[in-house]
Image (tube, rainbow, N blue to C red):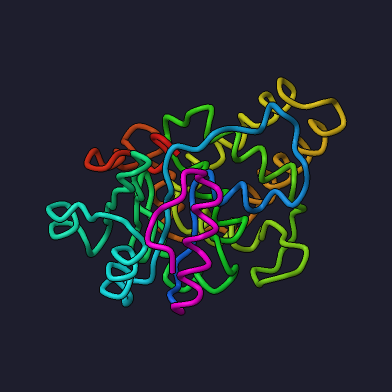
């Protein structure tokens, strides 16, 4: 196990995921580097970008083993932050490359929350495409970087119902429905941002690819709108946008993609 982080961030992400797999730790990439691992094909230059940091999610029962692994892999813990917040989130520094590694423990908590403890076995290195799409479109004040990553996911994946591992690595509509039909806030933020993607696709992609993305985005939107909603969802819908339906991203450690 190499103890020095690599300068190339995509190579470093690969080094880490291989090391975690060897240690049998359920650590999965999230953020932009996870989207990059799911491209499976060349993408237009307009969708390619650089990455600042590495973001992962870990199983809540593996925190102690994960901390030990990070030390062996050459990372320095933010001791104060990790002692205060380590049940939900941790931070580690790659000092030679002036990068940070942001760790979500058991779930994803930004503008909305999503339990991921039972989702880490669906893909060997990252979250599933549906979960990645949910993380990218759950920010109320979404940035262009997140929208571009979401666009990449839609361009390179078909949409299908089953929420199980599959060779075609599709976006599970069942997963999207399950999250958004239970929570009006999730639904509202996700569909607001989903509706932005056709315009960005027309700007960044050729007509054929833009048409494919637009069709998938609108198809997902129609499916989510038609899906049966929970009683909690319907009750919150009567209030609508008169009250805030989201949390503000945690200022300590910053948003997941502040630099990733």
Report the side of 125 relative to 142 (left or right).
Answer: right
Where in the figure is residue 260, as x and y percent of width and height? 45, 39
Give percent across and percent down for residue 69. 34, 69
* Residue found 26% across the figure and 42% down from its top: 253
- In which quadrant of the rendered image does the N terminus lie? bottom left
Magenta segment:
1-24
Is the residue 223 above or below the residue 151 in the image? below
Which is nearer the eye, 42 or 192? 42
Does residue 35 appear left or right of residue 24 in this picture?
right
User: Can residue 3 be found in the magenta stretch?
Assistant: yes
Image point (70%, 29%), residue name:
198
Extreme-right residue of the structure: 208
Residue 45 % position (x, y): 72, 28
Q: Nearer the viewer, residue 190 or 250?
A: 250
Task: Name above or below for residue 121 compared with residue 222.
Answer: below
Q: Quadrant of residue 77 in the image?
A: bottom left
- Residue name at image x 35 percent, y 46 percent: 110
Query: Which percent across, then down, holds residue 118?
Result: 47, 73
User: Is residue 245 shown to the viewer in this render?
Assistant: no
| Residue 194 is one of the magenta-drawn residues | no
Q: Observer-nearest residue: 186 or 66? A: 66
- Give the total number of marks visible in the rendering: 0
Q: Is residue 91 visible?
A: yes
Q: Quadrant of residue 65?
A: bottom left
- Residue 164 vs 49, above or below: the answer is below
């Amino acid at each position: 196990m190499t103890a020095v982080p690599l300068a190339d961030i995509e190579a470093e992400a690969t080094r880490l995921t291989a090391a975690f797999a060897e240690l049998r730790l359920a650590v999965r990439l999230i953020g932009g580097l996870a989207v990059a691992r799911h491209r499976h094909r060349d993408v237009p230059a307009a969708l390619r970008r650089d990455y600042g940091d590495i973001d992962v999610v870990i199983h809540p029962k593996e925190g102690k083993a994960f901390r030990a692994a990070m030390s062996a892999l050459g990372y320095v813990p933010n001791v104060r932050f990790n002692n205060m917040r380590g049940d939900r989130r941790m931070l580690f520094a790659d000092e030679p490359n002036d990068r940070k590694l942001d760790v979500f423990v058991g779930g994803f908590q930004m503008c909305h929350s999503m339990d991921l403890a039972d989702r880490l076995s669906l893909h060997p290195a990252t979250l599933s495409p549906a979960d990645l799409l949910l993380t990218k479109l759950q920010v109320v004040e979404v940035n262009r970087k997140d929208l571009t990553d979401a666009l990449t996911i839609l361009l390179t994946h078909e949409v299908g119902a089953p929420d199980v591992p599959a060779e075609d690595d599709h976006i599970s509509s069942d997963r999207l429905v399950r999250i958004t039909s239970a929570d009006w806030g999730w639904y509202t933020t996700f569909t607001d941002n989903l509706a932005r993607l056709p315009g960005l696709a027309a700007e960044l992609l050729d007509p054929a690819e833009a048409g494919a993305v637009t069709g998938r985005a609108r198809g997902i939107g129609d499916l989510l709108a038609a899906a049966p909603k929970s009683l909690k969802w319907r009750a919150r819908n009567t209030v609508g946008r008169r009250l805030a339906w989201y949390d503000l991203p945690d200022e300590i450690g910053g948003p997941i993609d502040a630099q990733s």
